Image: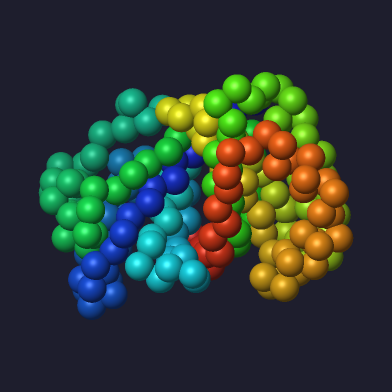
Amino acid sequence: MSPIITEIMHVHVNDAFTAQPELYKELRNGARKGGLVHQHYGLGIEDPKQLYWILHFDQGFLPKDFTWPAEYGDFPQKIGAISTAEPVSYFMPLDEFPSSITAAPATLTLKSDVDLEKYKQTQNTVLASLRAAPGNHGACFSVTETDPSRAYVFVGWDAIGDQHKWMEKESALLRGLYEHLQGSEIVHVKFTAHA
């Protein structure tokens, strides 16, 4: 099976997002009508004005083939009604994306001279440890197609404390991963699946 392209859209929301929830619901419904059936979304716990919208291109077409349904209006205008700036999207090929892992995405910035195969090998070792950790619901990662220095890691946790315990226990393993990174950012998001 070939990888499924998954888009993660970063949207900095304005007050209309919470005051008029039907605006964002209409955007999700428009994406679904256009064929993006599987979606997850949530606000950052550390930054509740940062929306993360995950869209899975798993219905037999690629992002370049997606057409926004005309009956849902102008997408840039609609997203502009709930945001303070133009959203930023990253596309990544993923072999799997179980819904149970949408709890703690991390953005990793790889070194410009990173050996991608060595990074992936190290990251897979880290994922194996994550998947075996108490309170973990699974993990996956991908390097984005549009920016090969950006990787996303998705990890599902029962609680942030479980993540911290794992990080303390696996500090040596993480040091090996950090050798490949220019920087990293971890955000905690309680995602909701769009029904």
Residue 31, image x and y in percent?
Answer: 32, 47
Residue nearest the observer in this picture, 31 or 184: 184
* Colour scheme shown: rainbow
Residue depicted at 85% across the width and 49% down the height: 172
Residue 101, image x and y in percent?
Answer: 64, 55
Residue 176, image x and y in percent?
Answer: 79, 40
Describe residue 7's horizontal placement relative to residue 84 as left or right.
right
Residue 141, image x and y in percent?
Answer: 64, 40
Residue depicted at 49% across the width and 39% down the height: 6
* Residue 23 vertical placement versus 33 (above, below): below
Describe residue 114's horizontal placement relative to residue 62 as left or right.
right
Residue nearest the observer in this picture, 154 or 175: 175
Quarter of the figure that contains the N terminus: top right
Q: Quadrant of residue 113?
A: top right
Query: As drawn, which residue projects farthest toward the bottom?
Result: 19
Describe residue 170's horizontal placement relative to residue 42 as left or right.
right
Can residue 143 be seen at all in this image of the molecule?
A: no
* Residue 137 vertical placement versus 124 (above, below): below
> In the rendered picture of this protein, how many numbered marks are placed on residues?
0
* Residue 28 vertical placement versus 143 (above, below): below
Quarter of the figure that contains the C terminus: bottom left
Residue nearest the observer in this picture, 159 or 59: 159
